[in-house]
Amino acid sequence: MTSRILKITDPTKMLDIDLSRPLEIEVGCGKGKFLAARAAAHPECDFLGIERMLERVRLFDGKCVRGGIENVKILRLEALYTFHYLLPAHHARRVYVFFPDPWPKKKHHSHRLFGPLFLNALWKRLETGGRIEFATDHREYFETVKECFAADARFRETEPMPRPQEVWTEFETMFRSQGLAVYSAAWEALEADDAPLAPLTVPPEAEPREGIARRISKKDREEQS
Ligand SMILES: C[S@@+](CC[C@H](N)C(=O)[O-])C[C@H]1O[C@@H](n2cnc3c(N)ncnc32)[C@H](O)[C@@H]1O
């Protein structure tokens, strides 16, 4: 029984991806309910789940091992960094981002995943015609993400994939059981000028230093988990 968790010994080296097989990626895959179901239904494709919470990574791994799901790898790492540095160019046929942390307070909006930096790296990793599928329960974040994509000519909005109940994520299952609305959208990557990604820089306020951890209060962190 081999763990599906990728062991990263050098975080500056590209991931070992089999370029002869299609690849689908889920960002913030949590305990992997969606990706495990999708991988079991599509043995012709490889799947990568990116999730930064160790406990969720382990639960997803256990699900794959017990279910004999071989075509999944799980990476415990930050998604923007992974997209920026560790993935092959224009290879992923789909990227899924379901119920990303909405960081509802204005002062925390800079923690949100979607923004020009992520869109740059996302476009670079999707094949031409590859799709990004997005869902959230947070109306304001949904509108903001739609504006972000509308401002980027490298993406065209398209119909979101059907998501029957069997493939709902853990959070989708919870939100729907509470009667909350779910907003979904999808975009296709178009052919465009392929400039190299500029190195990521850390804004001064995010540089690690003593006391930085206190900037996000315990209560705010709990709201996000
Ligand atoms: C609200 S949960 C949703 C989990 C799952 N997608 C679902 O719908 O059940 C958001 C997940 O994204 C993960 N996450 C948030 N930001 C991330 C990042 N930058 N890189 C990797 N994982 C991230 C969190 O740890 C959390 O498990």
Image: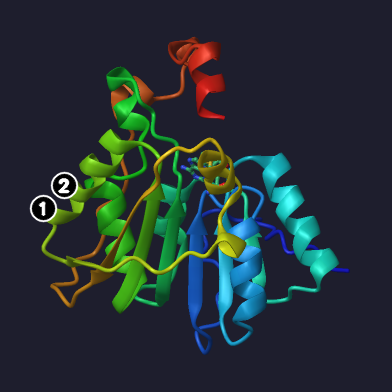
- Read off the residue under disc 1: 151
Task: Give the percent coordinates (x, y) of residue 157.
Answer: 20, 65
Q: Quadrant of the C terminus?
A: top right
Q: Residue 16: tell me if it is visible.
A: no
**How many labels sit on residues?**
2
The local crowd at label 1, few if under 14, some if 14 to 19, many if 20 or more residues have their Cα within 10 Å, is few
Q: Quadrant of the N terminus?
A: bottom right
Task: Give the percent coordinates (x, y) of residue 149.
Answer: 19, 54
> Which residue is at a point 58% across and 77% down the rendered structure image?
46
> Which residue is at a point 52% across and 40% down the rendered structure image?
175
Which labelled disc corresponds to residue 147? 2
Query: Could you tell whether 216 is left or right of 197 in the image?
Result: right
Select label 2 or label 1 by which is in front.
2
Local secondary structure at mark 2: helix
Q: Nearer the viewer, residue 150 or 218?
A: 150
Query: Could you tell whether 203 is left or right of 14 in the image?
Result: left
> With respect to residue 180, does 222 lie above or below?
above
The local crowd at label 2, few if under 14, some if 14 to 19, many if 20 or more residues have their Cα within 10 Å, is few
> Which residue is at a point 75% across and 49% down the rendered structure image?
58
Q: Amino acid at mark 1?
A: Ala
Local secondary structure at mark 1: loop
Q: Residue 64: tell me if it is visible.
A: yes
> With respect to residue 1, does 6 lie above or below?
above
Q: Amino acid at mark 2?
A: Glu
Asked if marks 2 and 1 touch (Cβ < 8 Å), the reply is yes
Task: Give the percent coordinates (x, y) of residue 140.
Answer: 26, 34
> Which residue is at a point 16% across and 47% down the rendered structure image?
147
Task: Give the percent coordinates (x, y) of residue 124.
Answer: 30, 67
> With respect to residue 15, does 106 lie above or below?
above
